[in-house]
Image (spheres, helix red, strand yellow):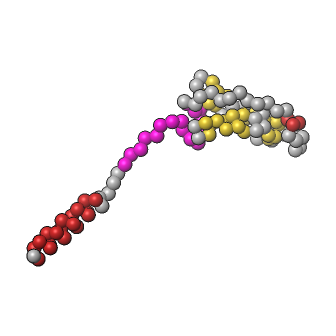
Amino acid sequence: MKTKLILLLMLVLGASSMFAAGRFSVGIGVGPAVGYYGPAYGYYAPPPPAYYPPYAYAPAPGVGFTWINGYWYPYGGRYAWRPGYWARPPFRGAAWVGPRYFGGRYYRGHWRR
């Protein structure tokens, strides 16, 4: 009787340790990169932009501000609209180059000399 009890305990303890073993897993994502700041591959073309003149929102907040037109940008596998806004150029003579979709790639907007 005592031997059967010991064997039963060993079986139960052995089986429980078998199920408590460490696990290792690897995941592979499919789809566009989220939070990617360079050219993005695999995005479909964005919808056409909606143009609103600068005066439709508010006058420039001060001298030296530039109107940035609204644009579509990739966000979580889809496009989100960023409405137009006033911005101060980061350096003298800076010109805003709006974002664009060309050749299956999305390029962010940036300031250039």
The quadrant where residue 91 appears? top right
Residue occupying the point 58% across, 31% down: 43
Left or right: 55 as drawn, with respect to 19: right
Left or right: 113 as drawn, with respect to 25: right
The magenta span reads 25-41
The quadrant where residue 80 appears? top right
The quadrant where residue 85 appears? top right
Which image quadrant: the N terminus? bottom left
Left or right: 48 as drawn, with respect to 76: right
Q: Nearer the viewer, residue 51 or 89?
A: 51
Left or right: 40 as drawn, with respect to 109: left
Q: Nearer the viewer, residue 10 or 57?
A: 10
Residue 113 visible from this viewpoint? no
Which image quadrant: the C terminus? top right
Q: Position of residue 103 (x, y in %)?
A: 59, 22
Instruction: Looking at this view, name the residue that lies furthest to the top.
Output: 103
Q: Is residue 75 above or below residue 98?
A: below
Label the magenta part by its dominant secondary structure: loop
Q: Is residue 53 above or below residue 90?
A: above
Q: Position of residue 81 (x, y in %)?
A: 70, 37
Residue occupying the point 59% across, 41% down: 76
In the image, is residue 29 part of the stretch drawn in magenta?
A: yes
